[in-house]
Amino acid sequence: MSKTRDPIHTDGAPEAIGPYSQAVRAGRWLYTAGQIGLDPATGEFAGADVESQARRAMQNLRAVLEEAGGSMQDVVKTTIFLADMGDFAAVNEIYGSYFEPPYPARSTVAAAQLPKGARVEIEVVARIGG
């Protein structure tokens, strides 16, 4: 392990589609790359609808967190990027099913375009251990 930052990689989430890591751990802090709804086994979207993509993005994030030794309960901050703010309620319902109180802080942002034409992208910051 490096003293500054360590990349995290799992086959349980899609490979990075650029020069970045799925996540980087810096001490007890974990910063994930944004996850879209790609199935890591096929490299294809879990579905065309935002619900399928949101669910898969959350599963991908959970896999990255677990690879780093953490869980969804370690998440302190999330950012959700939506291609259409009209999808907010549907994504919010799925997102909420992955957390228990106390919920992480969250921002939700409308994005003109997401990677590969995704409808939703989610990233998290977590504090793991102790």
Image (tube, helix red, strand yellow):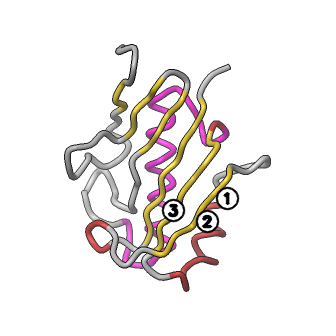
N-term-proximal mark, 1 vs 3? 3
Spatial CA span between label 1 and label 2: 5 Å
Along the viewing direction, whichever of 36 and 6 lies nearer the viewer: 6
46 relative to 63 in the view: left or right: left
Q: Say the numbered circle drawn on residue 55.
A: 3
Marks 1/2 in contact by CB < 8 Å: the verdict is yes
Under mark 1, the amino acid is Ser
- List the single residue furthest toward the front: 4
For image coordinates 53% across by 58% down, the residue present is 79
Q: Say the numbered circle drawn on residue 97.
A: 1
Q: Main secondary structure of the magenta part?
A: helix
Q: Secondary structure at mark 2?
A: helix
**Local crowd size for mark 2, using a 10 Å CA cut-off: few (<14), some (14–19), many (≥20):** some
Q: Secondary structure at mark 1?
A: loop
Q: Which residues are magenta?
A: 46-73
* Residue 95 inside the magenta-drawn segment: no
Q: Quadrant of the C terminus?
A: top right
* Residue 70 inside the magenta-drawn segment: yes
Residue 97 in which image quadrant:
bottom right
Under mark 2, the amino acid is Ile
